[in-house]
Amino acid sequence: MAYWLFKSEPGSWSWTDQIAAGAKGQEWDGVRNPQAQGHMKAMRKGDLGFFYHTGDVKAVIGIVEVIGEAHPESKDPAWQCVDLAAREELPRPVTLAAVKADPQLKDMVLAKAPRLSVQPVTAAEWSRIRIMGGLAG
């Protein structure tokens, strides 16, 4: 299993929207960065990811699961997307400032390249963020 981070502007697609999509989930569409596209193509069903709000919030809010591997977007088949379903909300959001301040996360992609919309997360980073967010590592 691999771990990822998915970024979304709350005004475009929020954690509340992701939860409302239910078990059927939602296409994670609109990603146009080639590096982020490559990450989605590497994802496998069952992989887990952090749901991160950008904009004014800048925090990991919840956990999603990849329920559908890379396929053409419904709205624009020239691009690939994965399907995600909400799995768990973090009791405490983990802010970008907290990530950058934690020495254990100094090499995390979120700390070094916070603009990348879809990013890999290491197992150690996954565990640390979960603990910071109030979940078991």
Image (cartoon, helix red, strand yellow):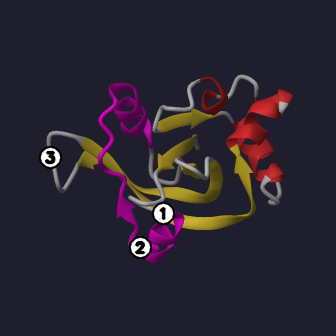
Residue 90 percent coordinates (x, y): 71, 62
Residue 15 percent coordinates (x, y): 53, 64
What amino acid type is highlighted by mark number 3? Answer: Pro
Decide whether the magenta segment is chiefly helix, strand or loop. Answer: helix
Element assignment for label 1: loop
Q: Magenta stretch: residue 73 in it?
A: no
Tell which circle, 3 or 1, labels the residue nearer the N-terminal end: 1
Residue drawn at point x = 78 percent, y = 55 percent: 133
Q: Residue furthest front?
A: 56
Cα distance in 3D space between marks 1 and 2: 11 Å
Q: Which residues are magenta?
A: 15-43
Cα distance in 3D space between marks 3 and 1: 23 Å
Residue 70 percent coordinates (x, y): 32, 45
Name the residue that disc number 2 marks: 21
Quadrant in the picture for the N terminus = top right
Residue drawn at point x = 46 percent, y = 51 percent: 8
What amino acid type is highlighted by mark number 2? Answer: Ala
Q: Quadrant of residue 63?
A: bottom right
Q: Is residue 39 left or right of residue 15?
A: left
Tell me if residue 70 can be seen.
Answer: no
Q: Quadrant of residue 61?
A: bottom right
Name the residue that disc number 1 marks: 14
